[in-house]
Image (cartoon, rainbow, N blue to C red):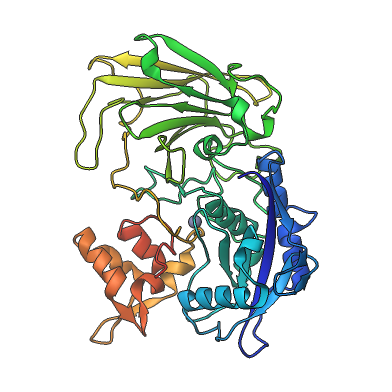
Amino acid sequence: MEGDKRTLVVRAIGKDGKTAPEHDSDTMYGAVFGDELCLAQAYRSCSYDQLRIVPYVGITTTGKDISNGVVDIQMTIDPTTSKFEVIQTDVSAQLQLQLGDVIQFDLIIYCIPRNTEFNWIAFAFANGRESFYHGKWCNRLSSLQHEVGHNIGFAHSGEMDSSPYPSPYADQSCILGVSYDAEKRPAMCFNAAKMFQSPWYDNMKRVINPMDYGVNVQKCFLLYGVVDYQPTIEVDSGKYVSVLLKQDDSPYGYYLGYNRKRSFNGETQESPNSVTIIMKEWKNNGYAQSWKNATLKDVGSSYTISNWNATESSSSKSSSNISIKIELTEKNKNNNECRVCVTRVEGNTFIVGTKAPTASPTKPMTNQPTKAPTSTRKCTRRNSKKVIYVKKNGKKKKCGWIKLGKSLKIRKNRCNNKKYRGKKIKHRCPKNCGLYAGVGVCKFLWLD
Ligand SMILES: [Zn+2]
């Protein structure tokens, strides 16, 4: 996550030599390395210049001269009708034939021509170097920042209480949530769990074990947003950008941060100027899904985590009578500093807070996926209304039929297996499959 990342943007050209991505070399240079808000700028800002995306310039081991970090690679297939896996395999193989080993590059961004047969947005290898973008998504800041985020080790940012099911992409205070159909925006960074995972703010991170403090003893500190990070402040100053509340006996911890909406985080899409409480596996501090559990906006608001430090395994979970209360006690008038107090509370008589929080995801999450799912965009009405499903008797139905399934199993089966005109329902009706089959609001979790 640190240092110069020699980055190559690849424009994938079809075997006919004509089919090309939507954006020319200059546009792609601008989107990735340019002067305006671009991928490199976003990472430089968010990482305080510690992660630098620089164009690959030089002569490759095969003798190819690359002057500005952007290159065209001709494939042996027709990308407008091929499946994603076929495209990915072919373009990657052709790159190695034409330029040599991929280790010459730290990041490779593939722009793939638009395909009307298969619906996908973007894809990246977790802790890898390659990312792939479909059509216009190669020139969308959020999809670039999101997928490169997977490359450098960030998993998705979701929300437990997004309606009607927990969604692994719903945390819009972080670019590892959904992606947005816009060039050069939104200007935003990462949630508190990702910030803790990165090495970019080490002097303003802190681990707190609430069990180290007595019952009803408040442990208070100041939280700042990423835009107010101070590189020179001493360690353990009481001023932090990310605080981990660690549970010794559980793999999950809670990360507290302040999502200050300003400057390079000025277009954060959710929980502006609020304290966010994010759950994530803390033990490896590595690639793992994060879940935003709560947002504290107003002074005096609080959130209580019950069943604190209950031991947990994949099959069982004990209970504890310990709760941890997190309270926003002060905000300064400039809106850039929050005082937060954490209190350990014991006993069953303690009732506070607005809702019963969940101490761990309801579904076990995969620890180390080899591939990250694609990014998503917000669902629009178009997604669910435009496409119809045709029953055996020839009657047409809108996508709303998916919700009529009696059980999750039935709904998933419909989405996964039924087809209309050769295309699976999960691709025809992604919004409804997402909503009603319990995989979250948005589409393209359904990349085959
Ligand atoms: Zn993703």
Q: Residue at x 42, y 58 (%)?
A: 370
Instruction: Please state the horizontal and vertical placement of residue 143, each as a whole percent of the image.
Output: 58, 58
Q: Quadrant of the N terminus?
A: top right
Query: Is residue 405 something that shows in the picture?
Result: no
Instruction: Please state the horizontal and vertical placement of residue 53, each as a whole percent of the image.
Output: 70, 53
Decide if residue 439 is on the left or right side of residue 57: left
Look at the picture and state if 178 lies above or below 234: below
Decide if residue 193 is on the left or right side of residue 273: left
Q: Quadrant of the C terminus?
A: bottom left
Q: Nearer the viewer, residue 162 or 5?
A: 5
Q: Residue at x 31, y 35 (%)?
A: 358
Residue 423 quadrant? bottom left
Residue 69 quadrant? bottom right
Instruction: Please state the horizontal and vertical placement of residue 338, each as a whole percent of the image.
Output: 58, 22
Q: Residue at x 61, y 53 (%)?
A: 145
Q: Residue at x 70, y 74 (%)?
A: 62
Instruction: Please state the horizontal and vertical placement of residue 214, each as a whole percent of the image.
Output: 36, 8
Residue 64 quadrant? bottom right
Query: Is residue 79 something that shows in the picture?
Result: yes
Decide if residue 340 is on the left or right side of residue 24: left
Q: Nearer the viewer, residue 134 or 272?
A: 134
Q: Residue furthest bottom?
A: 16
Look at the picture and state if 173 lies above or below 14: above
Q: Residue furthest front?
A: 61
- What is the number of callouts on the image? 0
